[in-house]
Amino acid sequence: MNQIILAAPRGFCAGVAYAIEVVELALQVHGAPLYVRHAIVHNEFVVKSFEKRGVIFVETIEEIPEGMPVVFSAHGVSPEVRQQASERHLKVIDASCPLVIKVHNEAKRYLARDYHFIYIGHVGHVEAEGTMGEAPGRMVLVETPEDAEALEIPHYDKLAVLTQTTLSVDEVNATMAVLRRRFPHLETPAKEDICYATTNRQASVKELARKCDLVLVVGSTTSSNSNRLREVAEAHGATSYLLMSPEQVQQEWVEKHQSIGITSGASTPESLVEAIIGELLRLKPDVPVSVLEVVKEDVHFMPPRNLIELALK
């Protein structure tokens, strides 16, 4: 290993920072225990740190005692979940990423005009479940170009496509090419659904893969965007691994590879990146560390004003 190159941008996106800030404020206002539906973001380090402070993560609304506060995770929820929360008189604090809410709103607008949908996403992913819940029975999911090629649906005069925000840009483009060929009247939102942070991090990892023979992606195996970063790095010629802790760093990496690139998923704290760098430098000290900046980010989402005001009281 002769050099370490850090991708920029990397790590927390505005949506993740927003969700974490919402939970922090909710803890100040309501104290513990505080319930959160699903992992606030897909990173075990973040989840465990909140659990130590009295946050209880649940998968169903039924697990929450009536009348308690609940935070909805960054991934968004379906109208059914919102209704369940209302029936249990829960105090809802919504940490859904505004860019996920944008896709939900697109679904609502199309549904009001009697559209059916194709949704590009991952089966079982909580974001996909939430968005598809906006139009039960009217939205069919595809994951890959092969799925799009094999898709058999009735003819609908009004047909639109929506996309999970954390997918591979290249894979979505390939899937969209198939869908447009097979369904020429397919409508797409005016602005693409894949979020800016996913796009930027994938663009930066492509450049990283061109300069490094090994790319380490710091992130959770449950994180869609982290997994996509590893796949993009490999697709552009670099060996790539997804890891979460310095214990996973292998001695052979510093011996075998000349340039090691490091990036991180949108739900990964920078402290985990620093721990990985520290372990690489322990194995081979005095290696220069540089930053490869592909694009600057300046997006920030403000938490709900009423939550801020309550926290300041």
Image: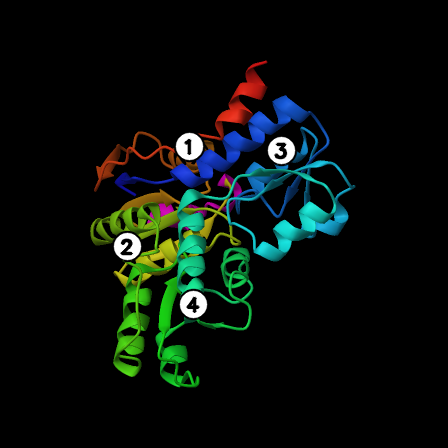
Main structural element of the magenta stretch: helix, strand or loop?
helix
Q: On the picture, is 257 further left or further right than 264?
A: left
Q: Earlier in the sequence, mark 2 or mark 1?
A: 2
Can I make out residue 15 in this image? Answer: yes
Nearest to the eye among marks 4 and 1: give it.
Answer: 4
- Report x, y in % for residue 263: 35, 44
Q: Secondary structure at mark 4?
A: strand
Local SS, label 2: loop
Callout 4 crowding tier (Cα within 10 Å): few <14, some 14–19, many ≥20: some
Q: Earlier in the sequence, mark 2 or mark 3?
A: 3
Instruction: Residue 52: give x, y in percent of width and height.
Output: 68, 31
Identified by mark 2, the residue type is: Lys
The amino acid type of the residue labelled 4 equals Tyr
* The disc label shown at residue 119, or none: 4
Q: Quadrant of residue 48?
A: top right
Was residue 87 drawn as part of the magenta stretch in this picture? no
Lower position in the chain sequence, tag 4 or tag 3: 3
> 10 Å neighbourhood of mark 1: few (<14), some, or many (≥20)?
few
For the residues bearing labels 4 and 3, Cβ distance under 8 angstroms: no
For mark 1, what is the residue? 274
Quadrant for the C terminus in the image:
top right
Residue at image location 36% in from the left, 83% down from the top = 149
**Residue under circle 2?**
191
Identify the amino acid type marked 1. Answer: Glu
